Amino acid sequence: MTRVFVPRDAASLALGADAVAAGLAGTGAQVVRTGSRGMFWLEPMVEVETPAGRIAYGPVRAADVSGLIAAGLLAGGAHPLRLGRPEDIAFLAGQTRFTFARCGVVDPGSLDDYRAAGGLKGLARALEIGPAATVAEVTASGLRGRGGAGFPTGIKWKTAADATAPRKFIVANADEGDSGTFADRMLMEGDPFALIEGMAIAGLAVGATNGFVYTRSEYPHAIAAFERALTAARAGGLLGADVLGSGVTFDITQRVGGGAYICGEETSLLDSLEGRRGQVRAKPPLPAIKGLFGAPTVINNVITLASVPFILAEGAPAYQGVGYGRSRGTMPIQLAGNIRHGGLFEAGFGLSLGEIVEDLGGGTATGRPVRAVQVGGPLGAYFPPALFDTIFDYEAFAARDGLIGHGGVVVFDDSVDMARQARFAMEFCAVESCGKCTPCRIGSVRGMEVVDRILAGRDVDANLELLRDLCETMKFGSLCALGGFIPYPVMSALTHFPEDFHRPALAAA
Amino acid sequence: MPEYPPWNADRAASIIEQYRHHEGAALPILHALMEAFGHVPEPAIPLIAEALNLTRAEVHGVASFYHDFRRDPPGRHVLRLCRAEACQAMGADCLHDAARDRLGIGWHETTADGAVTLEPVFCLGLCAVAPSGMLDGAPLGRLDPAALNATLDTALEGAR
């Protein structure tokens, strides 16, 4: 029976993929549900297995199915929606897919598929070379935390490995709350075994037998896909008392967040896992020394952990050889917001922001000029096109008072009101502040009020000065990155788009 | 969307019993209660406190910290609309005004006939198909006024 592949990625479902799958199931084809390749302007994208390889069609609506079948879709026949071989689509062909190699290709519930597509080689090698050499390999790869902080992963692992304790934990941070980011979601829905394998390698490397994945509740499809994968991993001997027949024990529990953005911050996440309010802890002690339930804990972002199987399987030089400056390896860049080609583009660091937005993204979806691009989520700076030469790299963005964060790139056209975006940043911080430190808890509310006065045209110059001063206080006085970085979007809006802040006074009510 | 049963202390107690021995059981218990009752009923708080050897104030502190744990039952349908930046960039704010106008309610409120609860959400990870939302857990992408109205029609119609 001919196999056709239809994504079950949440974004594909949002565009009607289930109805397309149902239509195709009625034509005698065997429908396999996959993740997404990450080209959402082509979703739902259907692929059919032919002797010449897979042939893609998209975007397919349920109403297109009968026409596609009549045109010979099951044999890769010609049709206006025919895209050809997916690997030849320029957006995919231009990528360096290390971490997302299998996403959108394999059945995310099948461990056999995962193994057949090159999975489990990394864990097999880690078991062969042992913990110390595994940590050394990760260190040599230059991998840095993909959650946004960019801390060297190997150093974190070594700290936990060197700690002596009756138990240790591996925690995957799947609380992907930054707007514009969906890499963790796509991976957990499209290739969840990569995360499981990465965590098992981490467990082996530092001597932990238990892992937790803390997934945000806003991702019900990722939660379900990951649970299915956990069941298959236990049945297939990837998890449990005898990982891949090695005698090593490792198992994973998934926990669901409570809708609090702050729990993406690692110490809040740990408090939340412990059953408490997700409030930030002061560091030190580092989680690698005293983390979950007081035990040494490696807490890494999903993409960080999912990058590890490639590093072990192909060797550190293969990963380290790609990148720019001190940012080694690849990053899944997520193109979002008002953009023509929204999706995920995995590439080595080093592209310019202009290349990302204009060349890969194809400019705005509305066709209007790009005015601002927010990189790195709600705590990231807004960049004007004048700064499109900024290189996508941890240090280059920091040098321009921004951050790459988790790799989200949100494009706005010229209808955006940057003073309103500054107001939103403060509002978001006020809603999501954990309340532990004053600059964030109180500062965000005062910040909202100050921007409101500016929006109303009241004492604009004095209030702008006050806003700058408040941002300084929050930046240097907050306990974590929420209050500490919210000044980035606010100050970048003010610096690069000052004209939006000088408004005429509103008539008094 | 399931119709949630009324408060039942025995059912709550058995849910709590199922999770109480897990380390850090509070969130799994609260989620399971949400699943069973559509919200975290007030009488559940002392039960959780006793099971986890915490004070009622501590449990209340946890339950009220997280946006997910409603204190009142939701309407028959829950519409979540994303308010975050990627959706803003595609005109979400206007769309949300229209939704609130048509439903005659604000965020976190339920229509008088109990049909729809409207909740804001900060990111569903559908940022490449913005503006996005979720109706009873089913994702919605590229919402425009027509698609939003069709969604609301379904929710209001199905509720009758």
Image: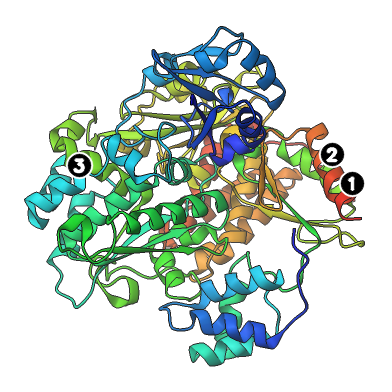
Frontmost of labels 3 and 2 is: 3
First in sequence, mark 1 or 2: give its number. 1
Tell me the residue at 43%/70% (across/down): A273
Residue B102: mark in rendering: 1
In the rendered structure, are the residues bearing label 3 and label 2 in contact, judged by CB atoms less than 8 Å apart? no
Residue on which disc 2 sits: B149
Q: Which amino acid does label 1 sit on?
A: Arg
Crowd tier of the residue under label 1, counting other residues whose Cα lies within 10 Å: few below 14, some 14–19, many 20 or above: few
Q: Is residue A350 above or below residue A298?
A: above
The residue tagged with tag 2: helix, strand or loop?
A: helix
Q: Where is residue A408 in the image (x, y as percent from the top left)?
A: 47, 37
Tell me the residue at 30%/49% (across/down): A305
State which quadrant residue A398 falls in: top left
Q: What residue type is labelled 3?
A: Lys
Residue A277: mark in rendering: none
Residue on which disc 3 sits: A121
Q: In this view, does B8 lie above or below B38?
A: below
